[in-house]
Image (cartoon, helix red, strand yellow):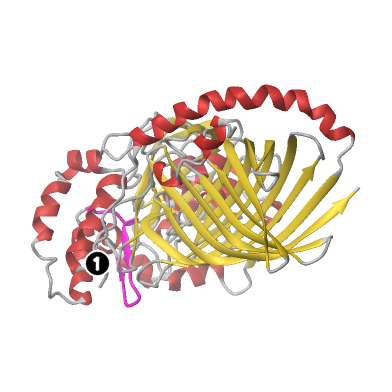
Amino acid sequence: MIPLSFLICLLPPCIVGCIDDEQYPDSPQGNFEALWKIIDEHYCFFDYKQHEYGLDWLEVYNKYNVRAREGVNKQQLFEIFTDMLAELRDGHVNLYSAFDNGRYWRWHEDYPTNFSDTLLRRYLGTDYRIAGALRYRILDDNIGYVYYNSFSSGIGESNLDEVFKYLAFCNGLILDIRGNGGGALTNAEKLAARFCQEKTLVGYIQHKTGKRHNEFSPMEPQYIEPSSRLRWHKGVALLTNREVFSAANDFVKIMKCFPQVKIVGDRTGGGSGLPFTNTLPNGWTVRFSACPTYDRDKQQIEFGIAPDYAVGLSNEDFIRGKDSIIEFARELLVE
Amino acid sequence: MMKYSHPIHLKELSVRRLSWAFLPMMWFCLPIVAQEQVSLSSSPDAMTSTSLIGIGTTRILDTYITPEQFSGTGFSYLNIRERVKDNRRWNTITEHELDLSSTDDRSGNITMLEGSYNLYWGYYRKWNLLADRLHLQTGGVLNACLGFLYDMTASNNPAQARAAVNFMPSAITTYDLTLWQQRFVIRYELNLPLMGMMFSPNYGQSYYEIFSLGNYDHNIVPTTCVCAPNIRQQITLDWQASKRWTVRVGYLGNYQQTAVNNLKQHVYTHRLLIGVVRRLVR
C-alpha cells in the first residue's frame, strides 16, 4: 500500500505560495512611484525633519507627482527626482544615473569653506610625512599637525603608531579634518580610540524595524574603548568646517566626548544617518539615510555639531598667508 | 518599456494547511531515524555517487538590497551520495549543491551576483511496488545553506548574507523501465518546507551595526513553511551504460524564499542537469 506520507509529499509545489514584491513599470510614473515608496518606507529622519522645518512626505508626493508624467525625457525626470529628494535636505540622499549624480550639497555650499589648499601647503611645506592617509609634521612651535582628508582612505594601526611616536614630544596636536566628507566608520573609530583613555559612551544608534515612519528599534549605546597601542594624552585641537560630513561628523561626535579634545572651526555639515542604496525600475540608484545615530545625550546631529570655538578664515590672515583656524588652535594648545 | 507585472501574494492559508499536514509525518519519521542508525552504519552493501553539472536561469529578489527583481544565468554542481542496503527499508542520501549566478535587473544597468552552497542529508524509508519496478521513499531532509547576494553597483548595503538550516519532508519515486533492450530509470525527488532557522538583518539594520557594534535584533529567526516556503525538486532520467556507470540527465528546481523581519527574499534556480552515476559496491 502506498503510504500516506508519500501521498502528502506529492502534493503539488504550487500549493506553497510565492514570496514576491510589487514591481512598478519602467515609466516616468512607475519610476516616480518606486522612488517615493523607497524613501517613504526606508528614510529615517521624517519625524525629526517634520519637527525641524515641516517636512511632509505626502505633500511632497502631491507636489511632484503631477510633474512625472508620460512625455518627460530622462533628463527632465532626473531633475524632477533630484528636486523631490532635495526636499529631504540630506547630503546622504543621492540619485545616480549614467549621466549625472543628483545631490543636495547646500549643507556646505551655502557656507564659507573655511579651508584653503594654498594655506595648507604653506603649513605642511614639501617635506611633510605621509603615513597611510595621514599627512603630518611638527610645526615651529613644537605643535604636531596631522591632516586627514577622507575616512575612505585607510589607516593601519602601525601607521598610527608611527605618527604618534614621531609627534610624542610635541606640546599639543592639531588634527585637521576640514574637507573630510566621510568614508568608513571603522577608520574613524580606529583613530578615535587613540585619544580614548577609558571605555566611553559616545552616542547611540537605532534602525528601522518596519515601513512606518516611526518604526524604530530601541536606541543602542555606542562605546569606544581605548586602543591597546600608543595613545595621545595631551591636548588636541580638532579642526572642522561645513564639509565635515557623515563618518567625519561621527568622528567629531566621538572626539567631543574626550576631555582633552577641543573642536575649533565651523559647525560640521552633519549627515548622521547610515546610508543604504536601492534601485529604480530604470536602473538609477538612490541613496538615502537609513539608520539614525545620535550623540551621547541622545540628540540629533543630522544637521551638524557646533564647535567649542567658532573660528573662521579671515581675509587679512589669508593675505598674510596665515590660516586663522590653525593659528587659533596653536594658541589654544600653548595656553 | 516593461509591462506592469502583478504581484503574487503569499498564499498563507494554503501554507498553514500544508504545515499541519506535515506534522504527523514528522512524528512518523523521527523515532525511526534513531532506531535504524546502528544497523545502517554496520554494513552498507552499496553506494552510488552521482556528479551532475547544471546550467539554467536564476531569478532573485531581495528587498534588503532593492525592491527590483533580477534574472540571469547560473551554473550548478550537484553531488549525490546514496547508501543502499539490500533487504533493508532505510537508506541515507547526502547531496552537495553549489550554485553561482550572474543576474541583471530589467534595465540591464545593475548586476547582482549570487552564490550558495546547500547540504542536504536525508533519511528515507523505502517501499518496493509493482514487481519491484516502482520504488517509493519518504523521509526527512536536514538542509544547511550558506550563500550571498552581491549588488555590483551599490556603494552601501551591497551584500546580503544567507545562512539557514531547515528540516524538509521529502519524497522520492523511482521507476525502472526497459526500452529497446536498454535499462532506464526515471527518478523524481521533492523536498518541501516545514521548519528551520535562518539569519537575517532586521528591516533597516546595517551589517555595520550587527558585526561591528554587535547589536542583535531578531537576526536569528525561526522559520516555518509560511515564512520560508522553500521547495526543491529534481526529475531525472538514467540510462544504464554499464554495470558500474549510468548517464543521468534531468532538471533541478530550487525555489528558496523567505519573508522575515519585514524583508522578502527569493532565489529561484532552474537547472538542466547532465552527469554520471557511479555504483560503488562494497
Question: Where in the figure is residue A335, as x and y percent of width and height?
Answer: 50, 43
Vertical arrangement, residue B171 with respect to residue A151, above or below: above
Quarter assignment of residue B138 = top right
Q: Residue at x 55, y 64 (%)?
A: B101
Q: Is residue A310 visible to us here? A: no
Tell me the residue that label 1 is attached to: B3
Is residue A10 on the magenta stretch? Answer: no
Question: Where in the figure is residue A216, as x and y percent of width and height?
Answer: 34, 34
Vertical arrangement, residue A206 with respect to residue A189, above or below: above
Q: Is residue B95 visible to us here? A: yes
Q: Residue at x 52, y 36 (%)?
A: A7
Q: Residue at x 27, y 64 (%)?
A: A109
Q: Residue furthest right?
A: B282
Q: Is residue A199 left or right of residue A28?
A: right
Q: Quadrant of the N terminus of chain A?
A: top right
Please name the predominant secondary structure of the magenta segment in the image. Answer: loop
Q: Residue at x 61, y 46 (%)?
A: B173
- Chain under disc 1: B
Residue type at mark 1 is Lys
Vertical arrangement, residue B69 with respect to residue A8, above or below: below
Is residue A89 on the magenta stretch? Answer: yes
Q: Which residues are magenta?
A: A88-102
